[in-house]
């Protein structure tokens, strides 16, 4: 009954109780796959997650999408930004210039809830304070990382020339800021690639 279901916390007690008949005992296959997924997530590189995606993950029906989405947080081969950062720049380019509007735009682009507002604001602050800033912030100070900081609409964001170049793929965030990584995510092949 939800246009966009964001999690169990949205359910009333009656709605939560309606899930009870769907319960089942956790199987050995589910436990084994969960253990392998946890090992892959904890590994120092993304290859184990990529390899796991090539296997049958049906015992845990949300695992495939979760691993795929996690890999999309690697810097992209196109511009060095991850999926969340690219979505934030797209939001600003689309005219969403306040922090709440950017958060809604980025959240609505997700297939399932992915990150909270504070994490997004932290990423935006990082993009604004980089050696080559991607966004310009106008407001009563730096981007607040807690909602108690005041009216979240008091801050407005705009793209810098660097931000526009990143959106078009004519610049690379990591190279511009003197950073590099061994692994990148290809939006085209949907695979992890070595830098």
Image (cartoon, rainbow, N blue to C red):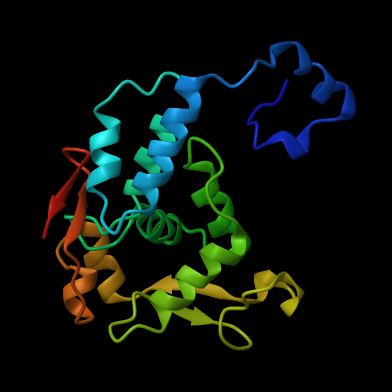
Q: Nearer the viewer, residue 105 or 22?
A: 22
Name which quarter of the figure residue 190 lies in. Answer: top left
Q: Position of residue 48 (x, y in %)?
A: 26, 44
Name which quarter of the figure residue 155 lies in. Answer: bottom right
Q: Position of residue 78 (x, y in %)?
A: 17, 55
Q: Can see residue 185?
A: yes
Q: Nearer the viewer, residue 31 or 159?
A: 31
Horizontal side of 73 relative to 14 (left or right) equals: left
Q: Residue drawn at (84%, 20%), measured in percent from left and top? A: 17
Compared to residue 42, the image places residue 60 above or below, namely: above
Name which quarter of the figure residue 175 lies in. Answer: bottom left
Compared to residue 29, the image places residue 45 above or below, namely: below
Q: Residue drawn at (60%, 88%), measured in percent from left and top? A: 141
The image quadrant where one finds the N terminus is top right
Which residue is situated farthest in the right direction here?
13
Q: Can see residue 61?
A: no
Compared to residue 96, the image places residue 112 above or below, namely: above
Q: Nearer the viewer, residue 194 or 126?
A: 194
Q: Position of residue 108 (x, y in %)?
A: 53, 42
Q: Position of residue 189 (x, y in %)?
A: 16, 38
Which residue is situated farthest in the top direction here?
21
Horizontal side of 38 relative to 53 (left or right) equals: right
The image quadrant where one finds the C terminus is bottom left
């Amino acid at each position: 009954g939800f246009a966009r279901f964001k999690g169990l916390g949205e359910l009333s007690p009656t709605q939560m109780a309606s899930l009870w008949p769907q319960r089942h005992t956790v199987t050995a296959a589910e436990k084994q796959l969960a253990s392998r997924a946890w090992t892959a997530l904890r590994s120092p590189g993304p290859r184990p997650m990529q390899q796991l995606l090539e296997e049958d993950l049906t015992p845990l029906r949300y695992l495939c999408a979760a691993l795929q989405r996690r890999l999309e947080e690697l810097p992209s081969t196109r511009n060095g930004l991850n999926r969340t950062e690219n979505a934030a720049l797209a939001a600003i380019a689309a005219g969403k210039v306040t922090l709440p509007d950017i958060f809604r735009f980025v959240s609505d682009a997700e297939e399932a809830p992915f990150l909270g507002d504070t994490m997004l604001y932290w990423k935006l602050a990082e993009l604004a304070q980089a050696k080559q800033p991607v966004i310009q912030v106008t407001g009563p100070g730096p981007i607040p990382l807690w909602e108690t900081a005041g009216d979240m609409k008091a801050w407005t964001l705009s793209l810098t020339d660097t931000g526009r170049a990143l959106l078009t793929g004519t610049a690379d965030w990591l190279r511009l800021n003197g950073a590099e990584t061994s692994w990148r995510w290809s939006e085209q092949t949907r695979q992890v690639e070595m830098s």
